Image (tube, helix red, strand yellow):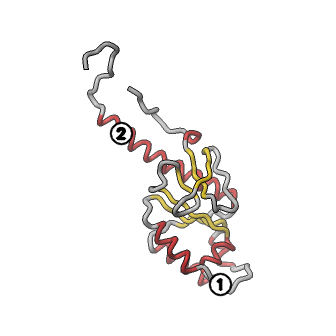
Amino acid sequence: MTRLPAELKPESVTAIVDTREQLPLDLSPLQSIEGTLTTGDYSVRGLEHVVAIERKSLPDLLGCIGQQRERFDREVQRLLAYPVRALVVEATWPDVEAGDWQSRITPPAALGSLLGWMASGLPIIMAGDHARAGRYVSRLLFIAARRRWRESRALVDEVTAGVQPEHEGAIT
């Protein structure tokens, strides 16, 4: 009988980076592969129906608040269907409040949109920059995978409790 290892290691987890992601994050120590995701930019292989993470730079976010609002609201609705979901923004709350950008989107409108998405159930992680976003997304993907791993391990232990390993020559 094969036993699951006691713990899942980050190097054993494979992240999926959507093929449309233009500036992929460094997700080390996780493994990474490209793939087409239905929703979001990042997920975990085998958990594509459970985990969806969307990444936005500040200019991308402003576009989603402005001209691409209807499309992004549909994306948010799809994200809300995932047990593990988040919008990771490569900016800080003070960046949004300062409004140092060339856009007709005002800081109160940007804050209102972010807070509205949060109120609808979408966790928003203000990562500050691209490198930190990579570290946060990597960690979030690993934590989601580890939780599912532990649940699976507990189920295997429960199902196989009291079952004797098969021996060569045993009567079955």
Q: Who's the residue at 48% across and 36% down the image?
A: 7
Residue at 58% across, 52% down: 16
Q: Could you say whether the residue bearing mark 1 is in a helix, strand or loop?
A: loop
Q: Which mark is residue 105?
A: 1
Badge 2 density bin: few <14, some 14–19, many ≥20, Cα 10 Å: few
Identity, as a three-letter code, of the amino acid under mark 1: Ile
Which one is nearer the viewer's eye here, 97 or 70? Answer: 70
Residue beneath the point at 65% across and 76% down = 96
Image quarter of residue 130: bottom right
* Residue situated furthest top in the rendering: 169
| Residue toward you, 59 or 94 | 59
Q: Earlier in the sequence, mark 1 or mark 2?
A: 1
For residue 85, the mark is none
Q: Using residue 145 as the reference point, say whether residue 131 is left or right of it.
A: right
Q: Position of residue 83 (x, y in %)?
A: 43, 59
Residue under numbered circle 2: 154
Q: Is residue 145 above or below residue 66?
A: above
Q: CA distance from mark 1 to mark 2?
A: 49 Å
Is residue 66 depicted above or below 40 in this figure? below
Relative placement, left or right, of 134 versus 124 is right
Q: Nearer the viewer, residue 7 or 63?
A: 63
In the image, residue 19 lies at what x, y percent?
63, 58
